Image (tube, helix red, strand yellow):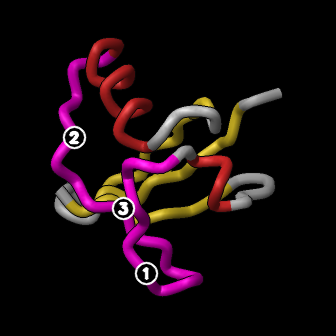
Amino acid sequence: MNQVLIRFKKIKENEVMEVCFDERLSFMDNLKLLKEINNEDHLKGRIYDPIKRIFLDRKVPISQFGFKGIISLHLFD
């Protein structure tokens, strides 16, 4: 399985969005696919890991972050 379940807290809208991303792709590539599916544009958003307290690089494959299980991240648009 090359999937990772991510729970994004969209800070601006104060909403939660759960997505299943392909960990072989980057956040940018997955967000582009998401935009094609549901027309939500988060391509300029910044992704924050509240546990590590850092903004994540959106251009590297998600597998490099070593996520396990369901991941909760913040999305700043």
Marks 3 and 2: CB-CB under 8 Å? no
Q: Is residue 7 left or right of residue 44?
A: right
- To which residue does mark 1 refer? 54
The three-letter amino acid code for the residue at tag 2 is Leu
Q: Is residue 69 left or right of residue 21?
A: right
In whole angstroms, how far apart are the C-alphas of marks 1 and 2? 18 Å
Residue 37 pos. (x, y %): 35, 13
- To which residue does mark 2 refer? 43
The three-letter amino acid code for the residue at tag 3 is Ile
Question: Residue, x 42% and y 66% (percent of image)?
Answer: 56
Which SS class for mark 1? Answer: strand
Q: Nearer the viewer, residue 32 or 39?
A: 32
Q: Nearer the viewer, residue 29 or 71?
A: 29
In whole angstroms, how far apart are the C-alphas of marks 3 and 2? 10 Å
Residue 13 pos. (x, y %): 20, 56
In the picture as drawn, the residue positioned furthest to the top comes out as: 37
- To which residue does mark 3 refer? 47
> What is the magenta segment's predominant secondary structure?
loop
- Residue bounds of the magenta highlight: 38-60
